[in-house]
Amino acid sequence: MEQFSRDRQELINEYLKGKIGEHTLISKGNAWNNYPSDYRPLVEIAKAAKLDVIAANAPKSVVRCIGQQGLAYLEKLTPKERGFVAKHVDTTESVYKTRFMASMHHGSKDQSEKQFAAQVTWDETMAESIVRQTRKKPGGKVFHIAGGFHVSEGWASPPGSTGWIRHSIS
């Protein structure tokens, strides 16, 4: 799910196994304000059914720095930190990029490009996380939760994907 970033996966696993409590998950997992209403029920269902919960997102701190400095920021990461972000981040021209750029109302073109790189970093990291899970458990199902802009009309689907994102819940 988009709610948690990859660097918090072990924490989620500990919660699902009952090794830590919910308060620790929420505080150390950097849960969003809408966790109790929008994500907690899904996590609890997964916990009861012994299902995996995948921390699909790139760490917010990395995404924020990409938004300020551009993709070159990835070169500053340690190998461990770099592993929390998709291997490939494609910022080339696309319908999605056109839509994103049209939504930007302030700042220079350079700043908008950096913001787009940050957005795509989230998208591509979530996509890669889903692909990893499907390879880990072939034939399994993945139920991914992300915001509407990431998935609207499949525009954020990476080129060559098999349509891992097609529907959004508003």
Image: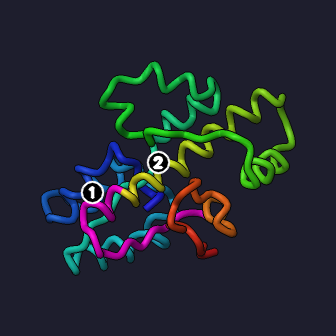
Residue 42 image position (x, y, % from top left): 38, 75
Disc 1 marks a residue whose amino acid type is: Ile
Q: Residue at x 60, y 45 (%)?
A: 120
Q: Which residue is mark 2?
A: 125
Prevailing secondary structure of the magenta residues: loop
At label 1, counting other C-alpha atoms closer than 10 Å, the crowd grade (few under 14, some 14-19, many 20 or more) is many
Q: Residue at x 50, y 66 (%)?
A: 162
At label 2, counting other C-alpha atoms closer than 10 Å, the crowd grade (few under 14, some 14-19, many 20 or more) is many
Q: Nearer the viewer, residue 29 or 84?
A: 84
Q: Which residues are magenta?
A: 132-147
Q: Is residue 152 above or below residue 115?
A: below
Q: Is residue 83 above or below residue 137?
A: above
Q: Nearer the viewer, residue 145 or 138?
A: 138
Q: Which residue is mark 1?
A: 12
Which residue is at the far front? 160
Residue 136 image position (x, y, % from top left): 25, 61
Q: Is residue 57 above or below residue 161?
A: above
The quarter of the rendered structure image containing the N terminus is bottom left
- Tags 2 and 1 in contact by the CB under 8 Å rule? no
Badge 1 element: helix
Badge 2 element: helix
Residue 37 image position (x, y, % from top left): 48, 72
Eye-nearest disc, 2 or 1: 2
Does the magenta run of residues contain 109? no
In three-dimensional space, the C-alpha distance between marks 2 and 1, rounded to whole angstroms, equals 18 Å
Q: Residue 133's image quarter?
A: bottom left
Q: Residue at x 68, y 37 (%)?
A: 115
Mark 2 or mark 1: which comes first in sequence?
A: 1
